[in-house]
Amino acid sequence: MITNRNCIVRLSRYKKALYRFKAMGFVKFFSDTLGEAVGVAPSQVRKDFSLFGISGNRRGGYNLDQLIKKLQNILGKDQIQKVVVVGMGNIGKALISYRGFEKEGIQIVSVFDIDPAKFEKDQTVPVLPLNEFKSFVQDNNILIGIIAVPDIAAQQVLDMMSASGIRGVLNFAPIRLKSDKDTVISNVNFELELENLIYFVNAAEKQELINEDKIA
């Protein structure tokens, strides 16, 4: 089933909340409890679940362990998801150092770069020449890739990924990329997010000053 991205984002948030519930000793819960935990209406929780045939009991609610298992299956977390990264710069280094991926069933299996000085084939996460990308991806049946290169090279890397069989791409380059219909792209633009955050913080402060002037 293919559904909209917002729904999948909410499913991920539900799953994280359920793990918190589990740590607190919950066995069952209701949609209003979960909705409050992630900031959505209980009706939205039920609607999202119904899209995947998940239903609770009006009196007993949802079984927490069973629902975690179903969400893991829907989100592809019931098996290890192997990921490759192109670009061994600061972002690439940060990604392979981050240990949070492991508990989510995500494994970065290799990084690729064009700089021979960065090649480290014998590391836990090897850094390999870019010309080995296609054969590695196809030999290991990799479907997910991360772009961590400068914007000038990002489109070329995306085209290479698509041609190699990559079907999902997380793009850290600050540029909007063009892809074929078979490749799903998710863009992460730190600069844009910070600009938006700065704007809203400044706007809120200006509004507070205006309100103070009116009161005075």
Image (cartoon, helix red, strand yellow):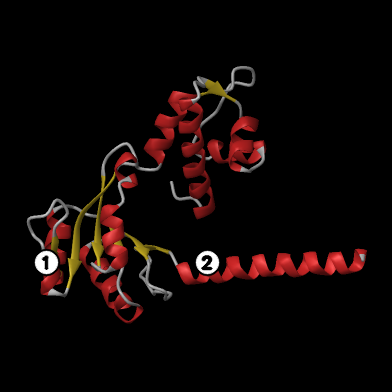
Instruction: Give the quadrant of residue 209.
Output: bottom right
> In the picture shown, does residue 25 fall above or below 194?
above
Q: Residues within 10 Å of mark 1 (few under 14, many from 20)?
A: some
Q: For this rendering, which residue is in front, 211 or 49?
A: 211
**In the rendering, at what x and y percent does residue 171 appear?**
37, 66
One can see residue 97 in this view:
yes
> In the picture shown, does residue 105 fall above or below 172?
above
Q: Looking at the image, which residue is at 75% across and 70% down?
A: 206
Q: Looking at the image, which residue is at 14% across and 57% down?
A: 126
Q: CA distance from mark 2 to mark 1?
A: 32 Å
Check residue 193 in the rendering and tell me which mark sits there, or answer none: 2
Q: Single out the residue that lies furthest toward the front.
A: 216
Q: Single out the residue that lies furthest toward the top.
A: 59
Labels 2 & 1 near each other (Cβ < 8 A): no
Q: Single out the residue that lies furthest toward the left.
A: 122
One can see residue 143 in this view:
no
**In the rendering, at what x and y percent does residue 111 appear?**
20, 61
Q: Residues within 10 Å of mark 2 (few under 14, many from 20)?
A: few
